[in-house]
Protein backbone atom coordinates (compact mmCIF):
# COMPACT_ATOMS: atom_id res chain seq x y z
CA UNK A 1 0.00 0.00 0.00
CA UNK A 2 1.41 3.40 -0.96
CA UNK A 3 2.19 5.93 1.74
CA UNK A 4 1.02 9.54 2.03
CA UNK A 5 1.72 11.85 -0.89
CA UNK A 6 5.05 13.67 -0.32
CA UNK A 7 4.91 17.40 0.35
CA UNK A 8 6.63 18.99 -2.63
CA UNK A 9 7.27 22.19 -0.67
CA UNK A 10 9.97 20.37 1.31
CA UNK A 11 12.14 20.43 -1.83
CA UNK A 12 12.36 24.24 -1.80
CA UNK A 13 14.85 25.89 0.60
CA UNK A 14 13.24 28.59 2.76
CA UNK A 15 15.86 31.13 1.71
CA UNK A 16 14.91 30.58 -1.93
CA UNK A 17 11.29 31.39 -1.14
CA UNK A 18 12.40 34.52 0.74
CA UNK A 19 14.63 35.67 -2.13
CA UNK A 20 11.93 35.23 -4.74
CA UNK A 21 9.30 36.98 -2.62
CA UNK A 22 11.60 39.97 -2.10
CA UNK A 23 12.39 40.18 -5.81
CA UNK A 24 8.70 40.10 -6.79
CA UNK A 25 7.76 42.71 -4.19
CA UNK A 26 10.63 45.00 -5.22
CA UNK A 27 9.58 44.68 -8.87
CA UNK A 28 5.97 45.59 -8.06
CA UNK A 29 6.73 48.42 -5.61
CA UNK A 30 10.26 49.71 -6.29
CA UNK A 31 9.72 53.07 -4.57
CA UNK A 32 6.77 54.76 -2.86
CA UNK A 33 3.35 53.20 -2.35
CA UNK A 34 1.14 56.33 -2.35
CA UNK A 35 -2.07 54.30 -2.11
CA UNK A 36 -0.83 52.81 1.15
CA UNK A 37 -1.40 56.19 2.83
CA UNK A 38 -5.13 55.85 2.14
CA UNK A 39 -5.57 52.60 4.06
CA UNK A 40 -3.01 52.83 6.85
CA UNK A 41 -1.98 49.95 9.11
CA UNK A 42 -5.25 48.88 10.68
CA UNK A 43 -5.39 45.10 11.13
CA UNK A 44 -7.68 43.55 8.53
CA UNK A 45 -8.64 40.11 7.29
CA UNK A 46 -9.17 39.01 3.69
CA UNK A 47 -10.27 35.71 2.26
CA UNK A 48 -8.85 34.07 -0.83
CA UNK A 49 -11.47 33.10 -3.40
CA UNK A 50 -11.04 30.99 -6.53
CA UNK A 51 -13.33 32.00 -9.38
CA UNK A 52 -12.22 29.32 -11.88
CA UNK A 53 -14.13 26.03 -11.58
CA UNK A 54 -12.22 22.76 -11.03
CA UNK A 55 -8.94 24.51 -10.23
CA UNK A 56 -6.14 22.44 -8.69
CA UNK A 57 -4.44 24.55 -6.02
CA UNK A 58 -0.67 25.07 -6.37
CA UNK A 59 1.73 27.75 -5.22
CA UNK A 60 0.90 27.96 -1.52
CA UNK A 61 4.52 28.41 -0.35
CA UNK A 62 5.12 31.30 -2.77
CA UNK A 63 1.86 33.00 -1.82
CA UNK A 64 2.69 32.62 1.88
CA UNK A 65 6.28 33.81 1.41
CA UNK A 66 5.13 37.06 -0.21
CA UNK A 67 2.76 37.87 2.64
CA UNK A 68 5.30 36.84 5.27
CA UNK A 69 7.70 39.42 3.83
CA UNK A 70 5.15 42.21 4.32
CA UNK A 71 4.22 41.16 7.85
CA UNK A 72 0.99 39.28 7.18
CA UNK A 73 -0.07 35.74 8.07
CA UNK A 74 -1.81 33.15 5.89
CA UNK A 75 -4.03 30.32 7.12
CA UNK A 76 -4.77 27.72 4.46
CA UNK A 77 -8.10 25.94 4.57
CA UNK A 78 -7.04 23.35 1.98
CA UNK A 79 -3.73 21.76 1.02
CA UNK A 80 -2.16 21.89 -2.43
CA UNK A 81 -3.72 19.52 -4.89
CA UNK A 82 -7.23 20.29 -3.59
CA UNK A 83 -9.83 21.38 -6.11
CA UNK A 84 -11.75 23.65 -3.70
CA UNK A 85 -9.48 26.34 -2.34
CA UNK A 86 -9.57 29.17 0.15
CA UNK A 87 -7.28 30.82 2.67
CA UNK A 88 -7.42 33.69 5.13
CA UNK A 89 -4.78 36.45 5.08
CA UNK A 90 -4.41 38.73 8.09
CA UNK A 91 -2.27 41.80 8.63
CA UNK A 92 -2.02 45.59 8.32
CA UNK A 93 -4.20 46.82 5.46
CA UNK A 94 -1.41 48.58 3.55
CA UNK A 95 0.84 45.51 3.87
CA UNK A 96 -1.86 43.15 2.73
CA UNK A 97 -2.40 45.29 -0.36
CA UNK A 98 1.34 45.45 -1.02
CA UNK A 99 1.52 41.67 -1.22
CA UNK A 100 -1.81 41.07 -2.94
CA UNK A 101 -0.85 41.22 -6.62
CA UNK A 102 2.55 39.42 -6.50
CA UNK A 103 1.03 36.66 -4.35
CA UNK A 104 -2.03 36.25 -6.58
CA UNK A 105 0.14 36.23 -9.72
CA UNK A 106 2.12 33.27 -8.36
CA UNK A 107 -0.94 31.37 -7.22
CA UNK A 108 -2.86 31.96 -10.46
CA UNK A 109 -0.01 30.86 -12.71
CA UNK A 110 0.97 27.86 -10.61
CA UNK A 111 -2.61 26.66 -10.18
CA UNK A 112 -3.29 26.96 -13.91
CA UNK A 113 -0.29 24.76 -14.68
CA UNK A 114 -1.15 22.26 -11.93
CA UNK A 115 -4.70 22.03 -13.25
CA UNK A 116 -3.52 21.27 -16.78
CA UNK A 117 -1.02 18.71 -15.46
CA UNK A 118 -3.71 17.03 -13.39
CA UNK A 119 -5.96 16.77 -16.45
CA UNK A 120 -3.14 15.24 -18.49
CA UNK A 121 -2.40 12.74 -15.75
CA UNK A 122 -6.05 11.77 -15.61
CA UNK A 123 -6.00 11.14 -19.37
CA UNK A 124 -2.92 8.93 -19.04
CA UNK A 125 -4.34 7.03 -16.07
CA UNK A 126 -7.68 6.48 -17.79
CA UNK A 127 -5.84 4.99 -20.79
CA UNK A 128 -3.77 2.73 -18.55
CA UNK A 129 -0.52 4.19 -19.89
CA UNK A 130 2.60 3.31 -17.88
CA UNK A 131 4.82 6.30 -18.75
CA UNK A 132 5.41 9.85 -17.52
CA UNK A 133 3.87 13.07 -18.79
CA UNK A 134 6.56 15.75 -18.55
CA UNK A 135 7.06 19.47 -18.90
CA UNK A 136 9.88 21.23 -20.75
CA UNK A 137 12.27 24.16 -20.34
CA UNK A 138 9.78 26.40 -22.15
CA UNK A 139 9.19 28.39 -18.99
CA UNK A 140 8.79 32.06 -18.11
CA UNK A 141 12.20 33.69 -17.39
CA UNK A 142 12.56 34.30 -13.66
CA UNK A 143 9.51 32.16 -12.88
CA UNK A 144 10.79 28.66 -13.65
CA UNK A 145 10.88 27.44 -10.06
CA UNK A 146 7.20 28.26 -9.59
CA UNK A 147 6.24 26.59 -12.87
CA UNK A 148 8.31 23.46 -12.28
CA UNK A 149 6.90 23.24 -8.76
CA UNK A 150 3.37 23.43 -10.17
CA UNK A 151 4.11 20.51 -12.49
CA UNK A 152 4.97 18.35 -9.48
CA UNK A 153 1.84 19.41 -7.60
CA UNK A 154 -0.21 18.56 -10.68
CA UNK A 155 1.31 15.07 -10.78
CA UNK A 156 3.58 15.31 -13.83
CA UNK A 157 7.34 15.13 -14.23
CA UNK A 158 9.37 18.35 -14.40
CA UNK A 159 11.72 16.77 -16.97
CA UNK A 160 15.11 18.48 -16.43
CA UNK A 161 15.01 21.63 -14.33
CA UNK A 162 17.72 23.40 -16.31
CA UNK A 163 20.68 22.78 -18.63
CA UNK A 164 22.72 21.43 -15.71
CA UNK A 165 20.14 18.81 -14.76
CA UNK A 166 20.70 16.42 -17.65
CA UNK A 167 22.54 16.39 -20.97
CA UNK A 168 20.19 16.89 -23.90
CA UNK A 169 21.79 16.90 -27.32
CA UNK A 170 19.61 18.60 -29.90
CA UNK A 171 20.07 18.95 -33.64
CA UNK A 172 22.33 22.00 -33.29
CA UNK A 173 24.62 20.17 -30.87
CA UNK A 174 24.89 17.28 -33.30
CA UNK A 175 25.48 19.60 -36.25
CA UNK A 176 28.26 21.44 -34.38
CA UNK A 177 29.87 18.16 -33.26
CA UNK A 178 29.74 16.48 -36.64
CA UNK A 179 27.68 13.44 -35.67
CA UNK A 180 25.46 11.99 -32.97
CA UNK A 181 28.21 9.53 -32.03
CA UNK A 182 30.78 12.28 -31.53
CA UNK A 183 28.35 14.48 -29.60
CA UNK A 184 27.51 11.67 -27.18
CA UNK A 185 31.18 10.77 -26.76
CA UNK A 186 32.22 14.33 -25.89
CA UNK A 187 29.24 14.91 -23.59
CA UNK A 188 29.96 11.71 -21.69
CA UNK A 189 33.57 12.75 -21.14
CA UNK A 190 32.27 15.79 -19.25
CA UNK A 191 29.19 14.55 -17.40
CA UNK A 192 30.59 11.13 -16.49
CA UNK A 193 28.38 8.45 -14.97
CA UNK A 194 26.24 10.77 -12.84
CA UNK A 195 24.12 12.34 -15.61
CA UNK A 196 21.89 10.83 -18.24
CA UNK A 197 22.34 11.75 -21.88
CA UNK A 198 19.32 12.31 -24.10
CA UNK A 199 19.52 12.79 -27.86
CA UNK A 200 16.89 14.43 -30.05
CA UNK A 201 16.33 12.23 -33.10
CA UNK A 202 14.28 12.69 -36.26
CA UNK A 203 14.42 9.09 -37.52
CA UNK A 204 14.78 5.53 -36.34
CA UNK A 205 18.31 5.47 -37.80
CA UNK A 206 19.32 8.46 -35.69
CA UNK A 207 17.81 6.82 -32.62
CA UNK A 208 19.77 3.66 -33.32
CA UNK A 209 23.01 5.66 -33.65
CA UNK A 210 22.32 7.49 -30.39
CA UNK A 211 21.60 4.27 -28.50
CA UNK A 212 24.68 2.57 -29.92
CA UNK A 213 26.81 5.56 -28.88
CA UNK A 214 25.58 5.22 -25.29
CA UNK A 215 22.62 7.58 -24.98
CA UNK A 216 20.25 6.78 -22.12
CA UNK A 217 17.19 8.42 -23.66
CA UNK A 218 16.15 8.95 -27.25
CA UNK A 219 13.67 11.71 -27.98
CA UNK A 220 11.65 10.98 -31.10
CA UNK A 221 10.88 14.53 -32.15
CA UNK A 222 7.89 15.61 -34.25
CA UNK A 223 6.83 12.09 -35.17
CA UNK A 224 3.24 11.43 -36.15
CA UNK A 225 1.66 8.92 -33.75
CA UNK A 226 1.66 6.02 -36.20
CA UNK A 227 5.32 6.59 -37.11
CA UNK A 228 6.21 7.06 -33.45
CA UNK A 229 4.78 3.70 -32.41
CA UNK A 230 6.72 1.83 -35.10
CA UNK A 231 10.03 3.61 -34.37
CA UNK A 232 9.65 3.22 -30.59
CA UNK A 233 8.87 -0.50 -30.97
CA UNK A 234 11.88 -1.12 -33.22
CA UNK A 235 14.28 0.75 -30.92
CA UNK A 236 12.96 -0.92 -27.76
CA UNK A 237 13.28 -4.36 -29.31
CA UNK A 238 16.90 -3.65 -30.20
CA UNK A 239 17.81 -1.70 -27.03
CA UNK A 240 15.50 -2.90 -24.21
CA UNK A 241 16.98 -0.59 -21.55
CA UNK A 242 16.69 2.51 -23.72
CA UNK A 243 14.11 5.08 -22.63
CA UNK A 244 11.97 6.56 -25.39
CA UNK A 245 10.53 10.08 -25.22
CA UNK A 246 7.96 11.51 -27.61
CA UNK A 247 7.83 15.25 -28.11
CA UNK A 248 6.72 17.83 -30.64
CA UNK A 249 3.16 18.51 -31.70
CA UNK A 250 1.65 16.90 -28.59
CA UNK A 251 -1.36 18.70 -27.10
CA UNK A 252 -3.93 17.91 -24.39
CA UNK A 253 -6.36 17.08 -27.19
CA UNK A 254 -4.17 14.53 -29.01
CA UNK A 255 -1.90 13.23 -26.24
CA UNK A 256 -3.79 9.92 -25.98
CA UNK A 257 -2.79 9.02 -29.55
CA UNK A 258 0.88 9.06 -28.46
CA UNK A 259 0.43 6.51 -25.66
CA UNK A 260 2.30 3.27 -26.31
CA UNK A 261 3.84 0.47 -24.31
CA UNK A 262 7.12 1.37 -26.05
CA UNK A 263 7.03 5.08 -25.11
CA UNK A 264 8.22 6.00 -21.61
CA UNK A 265 7.92 9.79 -21.60
CA UNK A 266 5.73 12.31 -23.40
CA UNK A 267 6.77 15.95 -23.03
CA UNK A 268 4.53 18.91 -23.80
CA UNK A 269 5.54 22.56 -24.08
CA UNK A 270 1.89 23.56 -23.67
CA UNK A 271 2.08 22.67 -19.98
CA UNK A 272 3.61 26.11 -19.54
CA UNK A 273 3.26 27.88 -22.89
CA UNK A 274 -0.24 29.18 -23.47
CA UNK A 275 -1.57 27.50 -20.34
CA UNK A 276 -4.67 29.27 -18.92
CA UNK A 277 -4.24 30.80 -15.47
CA UNK A 278 -6.69 30.28 -12.63
CA UNK A 279 -8.57 33.34 -11.44
CA UNK A 280 -8.13 34.19 -7.75
CA UNK A 281 -9.04 37.27 -5.76
CA UNK A 282 -8.67 38.55 -2.21
CA UNK A 283 -11.78 40.05 -0.63
CA UNK A 284 -12.35 41.57 2.78
CA UNK A 285 -14.34 39.54 5.27
CA UNK A 286 -17.61 41.38 4.68
CA UNK A 287 -17.44 40.73 0.92
CA UNK A 288 -16.62 37.08 1.55
CA UNK A 289 -19.67 36.65 3.76
CA UNK A 290 -21.76 37.66 0.77
CA UNK A 291 -19.86 35.64 -1.84
CA UNK A 292 -19.25 32.39 -0.01
CA UNK A 293 -22.01 29.79 0.41
CA UNK A 294 -23.24 29.03 3.91
CA UNK A 295 -21.73 26.00 5.59
Image: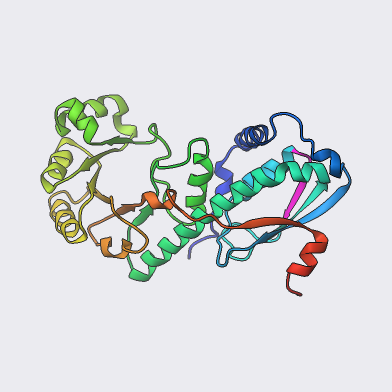
List x then y, in percent, for residue 95: 79, 41
How many badges with numbers are in the image? 0
Q: Is residue 269 visible?
A: yes
Q: How is the image coloured?
A: rainbow
Q: Is residue 221 magenta?
A: no
Q: Is residue 112 above or below residue 165?
A: below
Looking at the image, which residue is at 39% across and 35% down?
Answer: 165
Q: Give the quadrant of the C terminus.
A: bottom right
Q: In the figure, residue 120 lies in which quadrant?
A: bottom left
Instruction: Residue 184: tell me if it is visible.
Output: no
Q: What is the residue that sits farthest to the bottom in this orientation? A: 294
Residue 191 drawn at (x, y percent):
31, 28
Q: Tell me: 31 left or right of 79.
A: right
Expressed as whole percent of the image width and height from the top left, the position of residue 130 reads: 32, 61
Residue plotted at (31% across, 53% down)? 265
Q: Nearer the viewer, residue 43 or 130?
A: 43
Q: Quadrant of residue 288?
A: bottom right
Residue placed furthest toward the right = 42
Tell me residue 289's x, y (percent): 80, 67
The part of the image, by quadrant, that contains residue 23 is top right
- Pick whichever, 278 or 34, lies toward us: 34
43 sits left or right of 67 in the view: right
| Residue range corresponding to the magenta coloring | 70-75
* Residue closest to the eye, 195 or 163: 163
Residue located at (33% from left, 69% from top): 127
Amino acid sequence: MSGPKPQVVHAIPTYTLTRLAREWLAEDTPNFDPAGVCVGSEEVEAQLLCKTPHTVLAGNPFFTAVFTEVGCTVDWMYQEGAVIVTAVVRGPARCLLLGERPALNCLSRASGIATRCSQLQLTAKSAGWHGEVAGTRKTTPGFRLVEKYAMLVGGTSMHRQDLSGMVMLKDNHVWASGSITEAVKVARSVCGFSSKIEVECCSTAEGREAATAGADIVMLDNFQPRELHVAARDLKNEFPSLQIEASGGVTPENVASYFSSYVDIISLGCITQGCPVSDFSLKDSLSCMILLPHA
